[in-house]
């Protein structure tokens, strides 16, 4: 330190009068000299320019550099009259003054505090005064200068390092170098310890089912993090709302203050699961009572897909409007032809599955079905035309007009048992059929029949033919039970197996003798008009012919004397 220039006291004396010849004073007074390095307690008595005058109990005052007791803001740390501890640095006997230092005392005290804090693991206060030379941290004044890495300033990333200059905090001493009286400190360590304490306290106080308040800190694709104090809890996307949530940002914004219910606590991993929708009851409870099948309401379209549209009935309750339920006029090319996201429209509940949380809605059901309109304009027994659209094993579907289909069950095709409808129908064939009922079947099809078209023909046949009549037939099918024969296009008969032939033929012999498609005559044995049954016989016809032959020969021989033996021989020869 440079020797101070002449110092004037606070009186109005001129500079010349203030000059003192200290060499003369030395001759007149004996100075109680203090040893260099001695700690002395003194009182500030004056401030002159950049020097502090300190009464240290000697014949002369101590001179302290003003810079040593100026704080970060440029203000003096002490006032005139304050007592401070200084250390004697230099005794100038020639000029009669003593230079002292308060900073050296502060360094020694600071180092002792730092060492003590390091040994005990306790925090120590310090001020961030400037950037470190490496620009990767700060210098911290604790009486001695310590190094604070930027990574140890805070738990979070420091966005404005310059804003920390001049700030006072408590730090943990993590490393010391006694030889250089330096070391490394951390504020983050203290913050983490405090945070862990708060986390432990929070986890001890929370239980599943509690309602907590917090602030949204982060939003991701899968959910949102909510700060509830010492930790952030996660609200998964599925727990934000009972309704559809495509992305959490649809319902939440960063900074939103919300209330949520604690769903799960995992102290080991430090995780807390929260739910917002769980604050209120599940809207699907007793859903059948709120939305019974048949109920109609106005609802909003929330999403369209290739196979239909999702309709929000209330928050948390969505139903599916399938593409097939948009219109009666066949399947649309796209859903957007009829509905768009945001539309509000009337829909009807057509199916509900509470256990699966599924509701099926319909739009076309708000109107009368085309089949219902069709049947209103027709009566039972009406004969209508249609095009065969599909032939299945047990039924035939017939297109009657646009959007209207009828169905013919296999039992309504013929009065006789048939194996498959394709014996009678071909797809795209135009046919006539009779409406059997004004009531639609379970699939909303018009009930049709074709066998009923032949009722008049059957009536006429039974009126014209009695038992023992002989009629022409065509063999349709040979089976072990008998032979089915065609009398006309709409009338069939049946020859039981024991009425086929007088001889005891095997089934193979019968098939060889009576081939499908062969035409021949048959005798009517029995008719059942109520059941549309006609039973025929080949065997009885043969017997009848034999009797007729015998009678014929009997008449031709009446004019001759003939013995009974002759008649039998002639009959046998004729039969051969």
Image: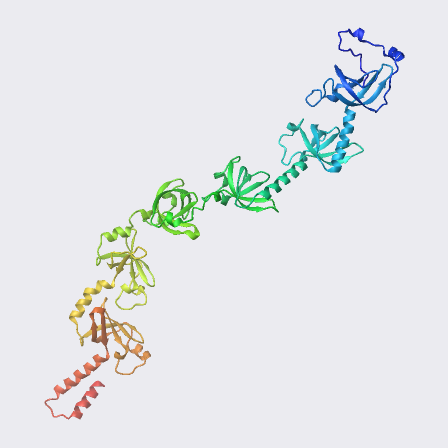
Position of 324 compared to 114: left or right? left
Q: Could you tell me if residue 461 is visible in this image? A: yes
**Could you tell me residue 276's position as x and y percent?**
49, 42
Image quadrant where residue 99 sits: top right
Q: Is residue 388 above or below residue 245?
A: below
Is 246 in front, or is 486? 246
Image quadrant where residue 22 sits: top right
**Could you tell me residue 163's position as x and y percent?**
64, 27
Image quadrant where residue 162 sits: top right
Is 216 in front, or is 435? 216
**Could you tell me residue 133's position as x and y percent?**
72, 29
Quarter containing the N terminus: top right
**Could you tell me residue 319's position as x and y percent?**
40, 47
Quarter containing the C terminus: bottom left
Q: Could you tell me if residue 132 is visible in this image? A: no
Residue at (30% x, 47% y) in the render: 367
- Residue located farthest toward the right when viewing the structure as drawn: 27
Q: Is residue 106 above or below residue 440?
A: above
């Amino acid at each position: 330190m440079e020797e101070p220039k002449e110092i004037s006291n606070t009186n109005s004396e001129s500079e010349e009068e203030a000059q003192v010849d200290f060499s003369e004073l030395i001759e007149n007074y004996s100075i109680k000299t203090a040893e260099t390095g001695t700690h002395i307690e003194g009182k500030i008595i004056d401030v002159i320019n950049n020097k502090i005058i300190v009464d240290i109990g000697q014949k002369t005052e101590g001179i302290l550099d003003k810079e040593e007791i100026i704080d970060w803001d440029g203000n003096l740390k002490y006032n005139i009259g304050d007592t401070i501890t200084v250390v004697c640095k230099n005794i100038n006997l020639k000029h009669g003054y003593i230079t002292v230092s308060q900073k050296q005392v502060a360094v020694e005290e600071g180092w002792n505090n730092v060492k003590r804090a390091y040994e005990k693991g306790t925090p120590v206060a310090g001020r961030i005064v400037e950037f470190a030379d490496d620009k990767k941290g700060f210098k911290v004044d604790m009486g001695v200068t310590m190094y604070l890495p930027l990574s140890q300033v805070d738990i979070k990333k420091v966005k404005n390092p310059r804003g920390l200059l001049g700030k006072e905090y408590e730090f943990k001493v993590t490393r010391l170098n006694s030889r250089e009286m330096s070391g490394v400190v951390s504020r983050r360590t203290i913050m983490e310890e405090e945070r862990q304490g708060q986390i432990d306290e929070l986890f001890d106080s929370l239980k599943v089912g509690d309602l907590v308040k917090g602030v949204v800190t982060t939003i991701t694709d899968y959910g949102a993090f909510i700060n509830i104090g010492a930790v952030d809890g996660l609200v998964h996307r599925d727990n934000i709302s009972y309704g559809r949530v495509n992305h959490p940002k649809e319902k939440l914004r960063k900074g939103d203050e919300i209330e949520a219910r604690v769903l799960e606590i995992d102290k080991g991993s430090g995780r807390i699961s929260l739910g917002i929708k769980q604050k209120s009851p599940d809207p699907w409870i007793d859903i059948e009572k709120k939305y019974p099948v048949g109920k109609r309401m106005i609802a909003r379209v929330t999403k369209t897909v290739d196979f239909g549209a999702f309709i929000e009935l209330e928050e948390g309750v969505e139903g599916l409007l399938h593409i097939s339920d948009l219109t009666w006029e066949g399947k649309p090319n796209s859903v957007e032809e009829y509905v768009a996201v945001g539309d509000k429209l009337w829909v009807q509940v057509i199916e509900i599955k509470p256990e699966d949380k599924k509701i099926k809605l319909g739009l076309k059901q708000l109107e009368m079905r085309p089949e219902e309109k069709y049947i209103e304009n027709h009566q039972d027994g009406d004969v209508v035309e249609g095009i065969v659209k599909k032939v299945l094993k047990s039924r035939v579907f017939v297109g009657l007009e646009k959007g209207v289909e009828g169905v013919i069950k296999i039992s309504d095709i013929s009065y006789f048992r048939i194996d498959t409808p394709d014996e009678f129908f071909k797809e795209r064939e135009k046919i006539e059929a009779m409406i059997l009922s004004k009531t639609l079947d379970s699939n909303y099809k018009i009930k049709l029949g074709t066998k009923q078209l032949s009722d008049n023909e059957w009536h006429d046949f039974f009126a014209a033919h009695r038992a023992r009549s002989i009629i022409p037939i065509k063999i349709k099918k040979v089976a072990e039970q008998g032979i089915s024969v065609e009398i006309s296009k709409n009338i069939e008969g049946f020859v039981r197996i024991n009425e086929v032939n007088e001889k005891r033929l095997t089934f193979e012999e019968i098939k060889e003798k009576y081939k499908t498609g062969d035409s021949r005559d048959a005798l009517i044995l029995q008719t059942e008009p109520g059941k549309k049954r006609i039973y025929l016989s080949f065997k009885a016809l043969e017997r009848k012919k034999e009797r007729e032959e015998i009678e014929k020969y009997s008449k031709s021989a009446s004019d001759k004397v003939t013995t009974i033996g002759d008649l039998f021989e002639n009959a046998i020869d004729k039969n051969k």
